[in-house]
Amino acid sequence: MAEVQPGDGDGIDWQFDEQAQQWFNPETGEYAPAESDPNAPPVYAGYEDWGYDPATGAHIDPQTGAYVDLSTGYNIDPETGYHVDPSTGLFFNPETNETFTEEQAAEWAKQEPEMEYNYDDDEKPDPSVYMDIDRQIKANKAHGRFERQSAFAGQEMKILWMEKLDQRVMHKNNVLLVFALIGIVLMMLHIEVSYDSEAKEIKGTTGLAIAMKFIIGFSTIALLCALFDYYQLQVYIWRKYEKPAGEAAPPGWPNSFLYPFIFEAIILSLHPVPYLFRDKMGIVMFLRAYLVIRVIRDHSKIYKSRHTILSQGYKDRGGPNFNSILVLRIIFDQSPGTCVAGLVFFFMTVLGWCNYICERESPYLMEDFGYTKAVWGTAFILFTGDVKFETHSDFGRMVELVTLLVGVVLYAMILAVMHNKVVMKRSELFGEECITTHNRMIERQKIAAILLQNWWRLERMKRKNRVTTQDYLDFNTVCTRHNRTRQRLDCMDKNSLDPTLDKLLSMERAFNGVQQNISDIKLTQQLLRERAGELVARRKG
């Protein structure tokens, strides 16, 4: 008998009788009633003297020691807990009536403790809240041990967080572009409103013009603040995820972020400052359009999935960095015609307006000069280099020079696109090579037919004894021409324009030569062996 702790606060130190399989009070010797004993076995008439196993819920036959489920009448295997069919000896599950062998029952019984815990009931971590899965492990250890093997563990969790940071970067670039476009629109509106068509000049000293310049200045300050916020986030991402392991972070911003920030801040800060710069200085604000490149980069599919690509050993295999230039090159390679057309339209529109506001102040200008004719003249400058305007100001000369430079670049891009469309692709080159190979095969057949025809003619003349020396010479000439033609065709088959393929073909020819030499050596050894056998047989004879 073994002592147990008191029950439900009744103050009785209950003891358990192993033989009777019942609880009793050691002070009074009375047994506890079955209905009050939570571990008491079910009572069946005629089986009061049978034992009971609480683990399997079976009664034990005192004569045979067999474990029997009295509710069904089937024996129970004490090791696995499954029922046994006495007619077949197979194990079966009374709930599903599924039968299985003893080996399967033992194997499934071992797996049951591992399958008891249902991990699906665990609370799933929120990726937007937990930056590191280790924090979730500390908060919920049982859940964390399971989630180490889930899709949110390790590198996958980092990728999810980096993608969320990319969305923040995309939002900041969108804000930058919006502020830049607002400043450009205000500048264009200021120049158009302040222009005096009678005096042919921009009145930048009026109250309205100065007020609009101050508004442009305020938008520029907001733009610079948004730029600082953007770089601050970039530095945070670099310190948190992209800094090399073991490298000490410098105080403040690294030079790789500080210098680009200063350069961009100088470009974005250019605007017609009141009382300092001329009104046409606002033309330089079109340089803010470079922010469109970042927006295009952030919305491209290849840039959004770069974290997954980088986690698969992209840099270890020599891949270039994922920057704006690489993304633009990929987009241009996928849609070259659309990109060139968009660039031509953008530069013709912008440079056309710049030429228009610079040339409309010329005293030699025609009366019907307008924005449409300015765009037409800009197109001539871009594609022909022919200037159609009478330049009389420094800003006009500067705009014409920029237009000529942009025209050279666009012209080169158009030529590159046309060249790529005209030049044959790899699949087309493969088809051409197949056609050439087929033609070489036909030429081999022709020279082989000519050789056979001449040989057959020579043999017929030999049978008639009509062969002359000239016939032999002609046949030798045909054989020489045949050999040279075959060598030329074989050389063309075994060489290509690809150096790597030529090396592989050269190695193939070398291996074929070694194989032929080995075959000749084996034949020589076989002949020597046969000759030695004949000599030995002669000596014995």
Image: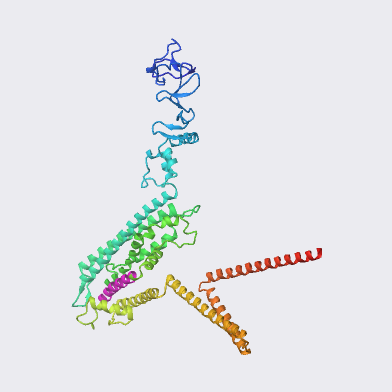
**Residue 342 screen position, x and y as percent:** 31, 70
In this image, 117 relative to 342: left or right?
Answer: right
**Residue 13 in sight from this viewpoint:** no
Q: Quadrant of the C terminus?
A: bottom right
> In the depicted view, which residue is nearer to us: 199 or 324?
324
Read off the magenta span: 338-358
Q: Is 368 or 85 nearer to us in this picture?
A: 85
Which is more toward the observer, 301 or 276? 301
* Residue 334 horizontal/vertical position (percent): 37, 67
Horizontal relation, residue 502 to residue 251: left or right = right
Above or below, 501 relative to 10: below
Q: Is residue 348 magenta?
A: yes
The secondary structure that most of the magenta stretch takes on is helix
Measured from the top left, where is residue 256 in percent x and y?
44, 61
Residue 539 found in image quarter: bottom right
Magenta stretch: includes residue 33:
no
Does residue 255 appear in the picture of this structure? yes
Question: Which residue does the image show at 26% across and 71% down from the upper left?
Answer: 279
Which colouring convention does the figure follow? rainbow
When asked about the image quadrant of residue 488, the answer is bottom right
Tell me: 175 left or right of 208.
right
Q: Position of residue 11 (x, y in %)?
A: 41, 15
Residue extending farthest left: 198
Q: Nearer the viewer, residue 110 or 319?
A: 110
